[in-house]
Amino acid sequence: MQRKTQAKFIVFEGIDGSGSSTQAELLYQYFQRQKIPAVLSPEPSNGIIGNLVRETLRQRLRFTTDPTQLNRQLAYLFAGDRHDHLYNEIDGVFKQLAAGIQVITTRYYFSSLAYNASNAAEYEFIYRLNQDFPNPDLVFYFDLPVEVALERVQRRSHQEIYETKTKLTQVRQNYQQIFQTYPGNWQQLDATQPPETIHQKILQTIADYFVTAPESGSD
Ligand code: TMP
């Protein structure tokens, strides 16, 4: 019997080096093998604003040297990119979902809350900026000790402005706080585990979570 799956918006979150992009890719490949239409759609996005953000993170583009203002500028850029990523009518998230395509996104507004606020007042600012973005159907949060994360990112060819011990320690704490009170569907995964073990857990959650129904007219 053929089955049909309702399109879902699935988000992967975690500190740099937590392996969330690798796992998103593995889920995407799984959907492909199952012939379930899906897209991998990261934030920062591959659109114009997303590219501006990436250039700023790599410090190829520098708007200000004031750390608070830099955080705010990035927060505005991330929010603008997010709006484009969700609502643009060419290939935005909602366009894909309406076409029955699963959307797998690495990072969403949780990243803005976790990364772009350096104190309570800035957190409030970021929260307000992002409060109208809808919750995804499901979030996978990859938890990883900062020391392990740093070892992993230092092996990469380029480093970004947030990849320091102090910053990632704060980001991890922020994530833990955010998910303590997050009312939507989410699952924490231990990112020190082998990639295949994590992937199997994700597949189990997807199987439990996805509502599948017999395709009408088929047997
Ligand atoms: P990436 O490593 O997943 O490509 O993400 C790039 C960086 O952007 C990562 O350090 C987290 C950061 N980021 C924010 O600071 N705020 C955001 O809203 C998003 C989406 C990412």
Image (cartoon, grey):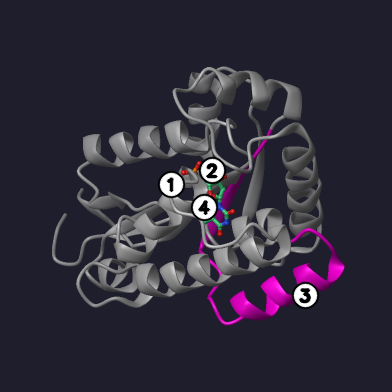
SS at mark 2 in the image: helix
Dot 2: few (<14), some (14–19), or many (≥20) neighbours within 10 Å? some
The CA distance from mark 3 to mark 2 is 32 Å
The amino acid beneath tag 1 is: Arg
Q: Which residues are magenta?
A: 117-143
Residue 137 magenta-drawn?
yes
The amino acid beneath tag 4 is: Arg
Label disc, if present, on residue 107 of the rendered structure: 4
| Residue at numbered disc 2 | 205
Q: Residue at x 47, y 45 (%)?
A: 206
The image quarter in which residue 182 lies: bottom right
**Left or right, residue 22 beside residue 186:** left
Residue 192 appears in the picture as rendered: no
Q: Residue at x 79, y 38 (%)?
A: 166
Q: Earlier in the sequence, mark 4 or mark 2?
A: 4
The CA distance from mark 4 to mark 2 is 19 Å
The CA distance from mark 3 to mark 1 is 29 Å
SS at mark 4 in the image: loop
- Mark 3 vs mark 2: give the one in front: 3
Q: Quarter of the image for the C terminus: give it.
A: bottom left
| Residue at numbered disc 1 | 60
Q: Earlier in the sequence, mark 4 or mark 3?
A: 4
- Mark 4 vs mark 3: give the one in front: 3
Q: Position of residue 38 (x, y in %)?
A: 27, 51
- Mark 3 vs mark 1: give the one in front: 1
Eyeballing the image, is 112 above or below 167? below
Residue 182 appears in the picture as rendered: yes
Question: In the depicted view, which residue is nearer to us: 52 or 193?
Answer: 52
